[in-house]
Amino acid sequence: MPQGKKNKAGRGRNNKKKRGAGHGKNSHLRTNNGRKEQVATISNLPENRMPSLTFENSLERDAPDYQSFQLKQGALHETFPTVYTRYKAATDRFLKYMQDNSPESIHGNRMNVNSLITATDWMEETNRPVEPSIVKDLELVIRVRSRVTEQSLFGRADMCHQHLLKTSVYCWRVLASLPQASVTTSLEKEINENLTLSGVDVSASRTRFEALQDSDEEAEMAEEELFPSKPVARPDPQPEPLSLEETLKSDARHDSWLFLYSMDELMRIVPLQYTAVRRQAVAQKQRGSQDTSIVEILMEAAVATNMAIQQMQQLEMEFELHHPDMVTPYQLLATFAFPGSLVKTREIVRDHGQKPCSEKEARLFLSECLEHNFRPPSDPERKCSVLVSEFCQRYQINNAGTEQIQAIYRRGFESFVSLEVPISRDRTNNKWLFEKLKKHDPNFSSHSWIPRDMENIGGDRAIHHTIRLLQFFGAIVSQIEEDGGIAITPGFFGPKWEPSRSGKIHEDMDDLLMSEILPKWFLLSRDGILGKTDLPRQNELATFWTCMKEYFNAPTNPVRWSIAFAVHAMLTAIIETDGVIDDTMISSQISFESFFAQLDRATQMKKMEAKNLKTPLFKHNMAIGKYLRNFGRPLYGNRSMWNPLCGGTLLTYVAFFGNLEVGCTLIDERSQLRMVLHLYHALVVNKMLKRGEAPLVDTLFDIFQKSQAIWGGTRPTKGRFVKEFWLSMGADTSFAAKMSSEACEFIQKVSSNRADHPVCEDLASMDTLSIPPIEPSEICTSFRRICNRDFHDVVDNYHTPEQRRIGVGSDSYTLAVQTNDTLDAIDNEQQTLALNLSSVGTYLEQFIFELSAVFKWDPILDRSSQEPSDFGLGRRRVVVHMFAQNLLGALDYATDPMELKICEVPQGRTAHAMMTKLLRIPPREVTWFQATGEVTEVITDRTNI
């Protein structure tokens, strides 16, 4: 069964290393209920540790066989290129075009930035037609380059970037004024062949460019500056211009900034969504109501966040393709935050070493220095003491050079890490140094490596602080026995977290993450349901889970950006819902327990009804649904499992997999839904039933009206009820026509008093019927969006024409449109998601049993097969036959179907009475959260580029 991609294996280090090697001076074993358990080994943990968690009887029941639950292969994710990939491809195409479409005498054998100016002048002089797509590519290059140069990174502008930007603007102004040319077939083919990266056809976006402005007014100002309407001055040639290869290669700092900028844009989705959650929760409290209507918007926020995590994974993968030597956060941060140290290191090696040191090799050394100082002292992977000596030996650096390298290491990393991303002990030990630096420089602050204008991953929400905590906790996990737990004294990593007090992710939330959330997720990922089963649809519905599993599978590996992004998103969600988080947790837990209480009730109803035998399908798929209850065990705690992102993700998984996908197999397990809906439709067409008389069936009809399995094509008209029903049961056209003809003949005999008892013949032919399954994607657009990754028909309702013009085709725009459309679908489908399909299926089954008894089909049923191994399927064949040929036949062909009697039972009148009385089920019995039935546009924000 396809279950999505497997988690990537841990990289770089062996993740099969046995835990519990006894590292650390405070390592010891504790016995709890006769079971060995090792406490986290941190070099300076206080002695009064909390009692360790145990995991006795952690799962309620044995895991069902998920492999046998047949999932349909979903459509492949519509992969769209990130701004990073598109920028690189656009630069490549523009430079290649300029080289191929200008005389060799202009650029010689080696084209450079100066050659671009000369080639542009030649094109203007010759009035050479230019392909429009190349002008668009150049627009993207200008937009991205302008954002880099305006940052004034590290206190100085990058002259190369500035000159390239001026040159690009000049080229654009000239080329945009030239005649347009059509794309040559050969060039288009070559571009398509060369610019396909990892299955992403980058050339498909050749006319796309990134939206980087936030308002139309700002866009107009920036447009005139970047793309002037009047001629611009010709840039002066540089004495030593960048070559074509150097321009294509770009530089690591520029690409690092672009990567971080893209990450910040993705993270922006998270506070946007959870601010809306907080507003709705506050509005709910002001109304004085405590209900579960908040669940729907919690699921919306979780879906949007998990989609952002998926896009972050793609961004990370594409960055690694271009920079294989910058695959870890430490390699990127060393390049981004320590450019001076990088240059200085190479100079020292050049002046004092015997072997050359490339930029890549120097970056690797600095990144290792950074990484190992992010690790705690007790981490067996930490090798700070030998990094400098090994580096100096490798390049045969003399004593004077070794001292200089040592100075860079101590000043630049040992001190800077504890000052930049301090945890509790750093703030205590270095308090005097903080005060001294602050006195020397009033603007000094920690968490400054990532620019503060990247407000979602920098400053008070610095993501590299989250990385340090994750690296620290990974070291703890690596030293735990196979059956051990982790107990960290609250307050050890900082002040105890309290709602309505946290203003920063770093410091304020350190203790919550380290002592409460991560220890519980470790147990869940190792011994809990995530560790013991390979649940379907995790990649689509719960990307956060896959990130946590990847993290705990290789805890000593350098933390990946996507993992840090996921955890950082969780902390952001907690901050954004500050003040209402307890209310959201209570509502989430109530809804979660309601869902499984309804499944328990449905199972009990099966047991109480002697005729209602549990088929293997019911047993197996109901077990799959019930097994998800293990997520809610108290062992995992409230704030670890029920914080806004984790709770919303769990409810999303329950809604789309546990309810929709599993429920679609159980609501029609014995064709009970087909019979009820076809009967309802026939009564409505005959004007015997009005909407509102059977509210539950009204809802079911609305939900399943587009199901191909139930209706085939269009819903039947009078005279086709019987035939269309048999077609929905998997019959071929000839069989359905034959049964319809027989039903018509029988009803005519009954009407003329030539027959009054039903006849049940030709049951054997029903064995060949292959009943088509109900597809969740047919009844639920949001399921199709999330689980099948099908976005072919999305509609943009939230961007202005100007925003669409600028952003169409870009990664941020595409993600925004797809996310918004998905959230709108969830909004519109609240009733579908809230209805417990598995539970409803049991009530419909009860209705069919009552129908059989009242219409006096039981004597014929009693003569049918009743072998125990049959699980009642022989009886059900009889019920289906009698239902179609008699009841539907009467509604199809009788002159007065309301009063036509078969076995002295008025067919239409009795069916109406049963439909309106027996299926009046209280909503609390079949809905597991409160659906408002209203689109929440007033409260829910949507993502704009």
Image: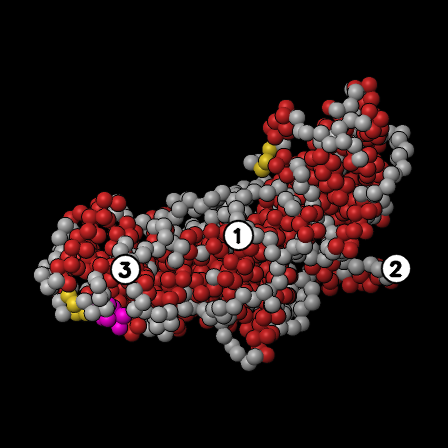
Three-letter amino acid code at disc 1? Thr
Q: SS of the residue at dot 3?
A: helix
- Whether residue 599 sits left or right of residue 379 in the image: it is left
Q: Judge whether residue 175 can be spotted in this image.
A: yes
The answer for how far apart the CA atoms under marks 2 and 1 are is 45 Å
The answer for how far apart the CA atoms under marks 2 and 3 are is 81 Å
Q: Are marks 1 and 3 in contact (CB under 8 Å)?
A: no
Instruction: List the residue tagged with mark 2.
Output: 440
Pick whichever of labels 2 and 3 is earlier in the sequence.
2
Pick whichever of labels 2 and 1 is earlier in the sequence.
2
Please state the horizontal and vertical placement of residue 757, each as a whole percent of the image: 11, 62
Give residue 851's quadrant in the image: bottom left
Question: Residue 675 got which mark?
Answer: 3
Residue 727 lies in the magenta-colored region: no
Question: Residue 543 got which mark?
Answer: 1
Report the residue at 63% width, 34% height from top. Answer: 203
Question: Which span of residues is magenta-colored?
Answer: 907-914
Chief secondary structure of the magenta span?
helix
